[in-house]
Image (tube, grey):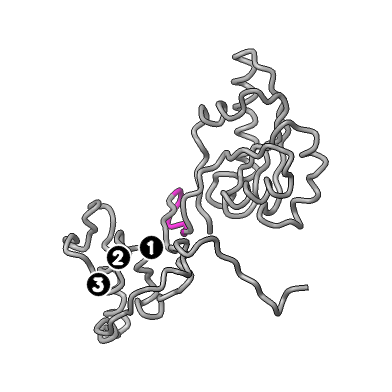
Amino acid sequence: MIVGERKPFDEIREMLKGYKKVLILGCRTCVAVCMAGGDKEVELLGSQLRIASKKDGVELEIIEDAIERQCDREYMEPIREKVEQVDAVLSMACGCGVQFMAEMYSDKPVLPAINTNFIGVNEDVGVWTERCGQCGNCVLHLTGGICPIARCSKSLLNGPCGGSQDGKCEISKDVDCGWQLIYDRMKQLGQLDKLEEVIPAKDWNTSRDGGPRKVVREDVKI
């Protein structure tokens, strides 16, 4: 899932300066799961903004809502009436949701309340960690299901660098060396011999370095 965190409150307030009526719009998928932008977070932010505005004597009317996905036109259309009523939308979706909202409602300022971090997993209660580098050319079948792009700090494809010590990455003793994880997994699978195969230099055209990407499924297009 996409993992994000709410922006600092002061930064959000700064963005809202000059607007008198704002829709705080949550997203009930990824950012709700990581407790950054679902219904509860919309309600909490709305209350904080009302209290702060009243305390400072600033006129600010808040409308709250949340939809299933802000990256899907199907769920965006029903809120059109609410969007038209406000001066700006404060989106609590990931960066995709904010941008798609801005595309659909091009005459309305759409402001981000979330910092989008990465694609990751819920490792423990309140702990999310990165797992996918979105490179567009998956090599997990060669590395025991552990991504060297996301888990190795240098995104190395053929083993660790010289900086790892005792299974930890040189950037922090709290970060596992991605290639140590790969080695341990391959050993567990009885597939260490596969690590002797050299993974060719990666074609980064499929990653973000190749420019904005697009996926078209002709079999499901209408």
The numbered mark, 2 or 1, whose residue comes first in the sequence reads: 1
Residue type of the residue flagged with mark 2: Gly
Above or below — where is 166 with respect to 99?
Answer: below
Q: Quote the CA–CA distance across marks 2 and 3.
A: 9 Å
Residue named by callout 3: 159
Name the foreground residue: 174 vs 113. Answer: 113
Residue range in magenta is 120-126
Residue named by callout 1: 150
The secondary element bearing badge 3 is classed as: loop
Residue type of the residue flagged with mark 3: Gly
> In the rendered view of the protein, which quadrant contains the C terminus?
bottom right
Spot occupied by residue 177 in the image (x, y as percentages of width and height): 26, 62
Q: Of the numbered discs in the image, which one, if any, rests on residue 5?
A: none
Which residue corresponds to the image point at 46% horizontal and 69% vertical from the top-left? 205
Spot occupied by residue 34 in the image (x, y as percentages of width and height): 53, 50
Spot occupied by residue 104 in the image (x, y as percentages of width and height): 73, 49
Magenta stretch secondary structure, dominant? strand
Q: Is residue 54 left or right of residue 179?
A: right
The secondary element bearing badge 2 is classed as: helix
* Mark 2–mark 1 CB contact (< 8 Å): yes
Which residue corresponds to the image point at 29% horizontal and 68% vertical from the top-left? 156
Tell me the mark number nearer the camera, choosing from 2 and 1.
1
The numbered mark, 3 or 1, whose residue comes first in the sequence reads: 1
Residue named by callout 2: 178
The secondary element bearing badge 1 is classed as: helix
Above or below — where is 10 with respect to 221?
Answer: above
Name the foreground residue: 76 vs 202. Answer: 202
Quarter assignment of residue 48: top right
Quarter assignment of residue 151: bottom left
